[in-house]
Amino acid sequence: MKGQYDDIIDLPHHVSARHPKMPMSERAAQFSPFMALAGYEDVIRETARLTGQKPELSENVCEELEGKMRILAEHIAEHPEITVSYFLPDEKKKGGSMVRETGRLKKIDETERILRLENGCEIRVDDILELESEMFGELF
């Protein structure tokens, strides 16, 4: 049986005198897949990231938080240590996550409704879910 390329099939492999042989590591790169859509993987990763809904507080819990805020406002000069559980809205998509922060209270900004801690953390009063402090003692 005679094939179309029988005349060249046994010839030695051509080696260029002008161009040096490409290393295998570089040669393989030309066959690697390319990213057709730049940023697509980031979008997929962001979509897969889970966020939660902000829980609705009962009227009793809201009243308790208001009472605790009044006590903190009265003792602000003492810079009491508090632990705040709050909802942190996500910057990129709907929802957010629950966060717990402990630190010394520096200031309550009633105009902007923000608690400022000495460690630099700022917490929106409307996002607070729970307040804890030894200062509350047996009151709550």
Image (cartoon, rainbow, N blue to C red):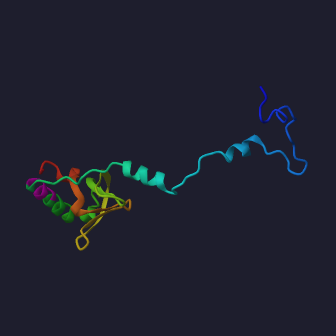
- Depth check: 96 or 127 in front? 96
Left or right of residue 69: residue 30: right
Report the residue that reaches farthest toward the front.
1
Q: Residue at x 42, y 50 (%)?
A: 44
Chief secondary structure of the magenta portion:
helix
Q: Residue at x 59, y 47 (%)?
A: 33
Residue 37 to residue 6: above or below: below
Q: Residue at x 40, y 52 (%)?
A: 46
x, y percent for residue 135: 20, 53
- Split into 4 quadrants, where in the image is the N terminus? top right
Left or right of residue 69: residue 94: right
x, y percent for residue 101: 32, 52
Left or right of residue 114: residue 34: right
x, y percent for residue 20: 85, 48
x, y percent for residue 128: 23, 57
- Depth check: 52 or 88 in front? 52
- Depth check: 1 or 9 in front? 1
Residue interval drawn in magenta:
60-65
Residue 13 to residue 110: above or below: above
Residue 51 to residue 69: above or below: above
Q: Is residue 129 magenta?
A: no
Q: Is residue 64 magenta?
A: yes
Report the residue that reaches farthest toward the left.
60
- Depth check: 64 or 133 in front? 64
